[in-house]
Image (cartoon, rainbow, N blue to C red):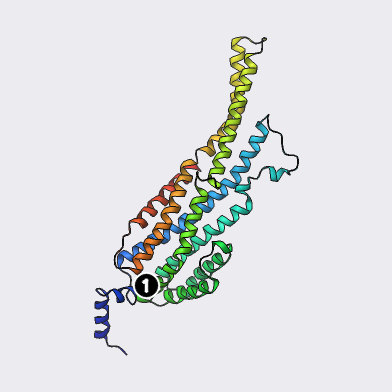
């Protein structure tokens, strides 16, 4: 058995020797804080992203229903059922469900990292590890960057590394898990951010297109109504003004619905930015665990963007 003095020499050498710094030493306070910040931010981003997909799915149905009932020029497609009519292909139930799987996988990864950092109870570590494995294995094949066998191996590392009460073992486990999962996490972050983006022709931009479409339909309807009133020879000026006010009042709920969803541009922009910064933060965390020179700026920027997203989403509710 090694003596205490020998262990002390090893720990001292690990502070100045790169090889031992990357394998065999506990995390520095900064590294531990970086991992904790990333995990809490990634967990929050995954859950917020999932919520946004739910809002877009239900909101797109409301917008489509209001559009078809207001647009007097539209001929309703006879070949579609009512449910199909109220479903945007880009924001279908199936597409939303897949994105929410991706969001859950990101949250489960973050919770597994947090458990590895903080938990000493094997049951809690096993729960976190199993949840992550289930989430990742449920993803579509072309979204997976870690094999099922590697997922199982890394899951055991989470359980074993966290259950041993030494910072060294936790650090060694993290130094294997985080780099191995980085590409997977990067893909999930960018996937969620891109789909929520108000630009690029994906789900977020389609959702905002539907809200603008409804607003334009209502505006045209108000213009047509005003033109009809102005041409009515039986009405005097006061009566015409009153009828125009009545028309605006009648359509006000529809205008409010359109504007309510149009104002979510900022939330979706924040979500898109959070996705990009999530990917950069994952790379930063990987470097902090595998290199001697690194910066935590990307992790801090990600945390701030998630705070902005949370504030925007909360205000919108």
Residue 264 locus on image (x, y percent): 50, 41
Q: Quadrant of residue 12?
A: bottom left
Vertical comparison of 236 with 93: above or below: above
Residue at mark 1: 171
Residue 309 locus on image (x, y percent): 44, 48
Q: Residues within 10 Å of mark 1 (few under 14, many from 20)?
A: many
Q: Residue furthest right?
A: 78
Residue beneath the point at 50% across and 38% down = 263
Q: Nearer the viewer, residue 131 or 183?
A: 183
Residue 136 locus on image (x, y percent): 54, 65
Q: Is residue 128 among what the camera can see? A: yes
Count the marks: 1
Q: Quadrant of residue 23?
A: bottom left
Q: Is residue 12 left or right of residue 254?
A: left
Q: Is residue 205 left or right of residue 88?
A: left
Q: Is residue 93 left or right of residue 282?
A: right
Vertical comparison of 274 with 256: above or below: below
Vertical comparison of 287 with 59: above or below: below
Q: Is residue 24 left or right of residue 55?
A: left
Residue 201 locus on image (x, y percent): 54, 45
Vertical comparison of 121 with 243: above or below: below
Q: Quadrant of residue 77?
A: top right
Q: Identify the element where label 1 is drawn.
A: helix
Residue beneath the point at 49% across and 56% down = 46
Q: Residue furthest bottom?
A: 1
Residue beneath the point at 48% across and 59% down = 187
Quadrant where the N terminus lies? bottom left
Q: Is residue 253 among what the camera can see? A: no
Residue beneath the point at 52% across and 57% down = 103
């Amino acid at each position: 058995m090694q003596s205490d003095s020998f262990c002390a020499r090893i720990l001292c050498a690990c502070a100045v020797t790169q090889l031992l710094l990357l394998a065999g030493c506990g995390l520095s306070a900064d590294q531990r804080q970086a991992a904790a910040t990333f995990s809490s931010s990634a967990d929050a981003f995954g859950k917020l992203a999932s919520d946004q997909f739910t809002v877009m799915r239900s909101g797109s149905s409301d917008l489509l229903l209001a559009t078809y009932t207001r647009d007097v020029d539209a001929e309703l497609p006879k070949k579609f059922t009512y449910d199909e009519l109220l479903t945007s292909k880009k924001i279908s139930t199936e597409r939303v469900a897949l994105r929410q799987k991706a969001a859950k996988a990101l949250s489960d990864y973050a919770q597994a990292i947090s458990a590895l950092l903080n938990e000493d109870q094997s049951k809690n570590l096993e729960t976190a590890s199993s949840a992550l494995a289930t989430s990742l294995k449920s993803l579509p094949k072309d979204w997976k960057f870690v094999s099922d066998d590697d997922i199982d191996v890394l899951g055991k590392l989470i359980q074993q590394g966290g259950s041993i009460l030494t910072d060294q073992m936790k650090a060694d486990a993290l130094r294997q898990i985080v780099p191995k999962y980085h590409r997977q996490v990067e893909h999930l972050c960018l996937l969620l951010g891109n789909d929520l983006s108000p630009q690029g022709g994906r789900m977020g931009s389609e959702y905002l297109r539907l809200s603008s479409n409804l607003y334009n339909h209502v505006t045209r309807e108000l213009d047509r109504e005003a033109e009809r009133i102005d041409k009515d020879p039986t009405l005097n000026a006061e009566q015409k003004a009153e009828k125009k006010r009545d028309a605006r009042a009648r359509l006000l709920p529809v205008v409010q619905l359109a504007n309510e969803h149009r104002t979510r541009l900022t939330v979706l922009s924040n979500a898109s930015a959070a996705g990009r910064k999530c990917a950069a933060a994952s790379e930063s965390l990987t470097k902090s665990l595998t290199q001697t020179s690194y910066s935590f700026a990307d992790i801090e920027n990600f945390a701030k963007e998630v705070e902005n997203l949370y504030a925007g989403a909360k205000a919108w509710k």
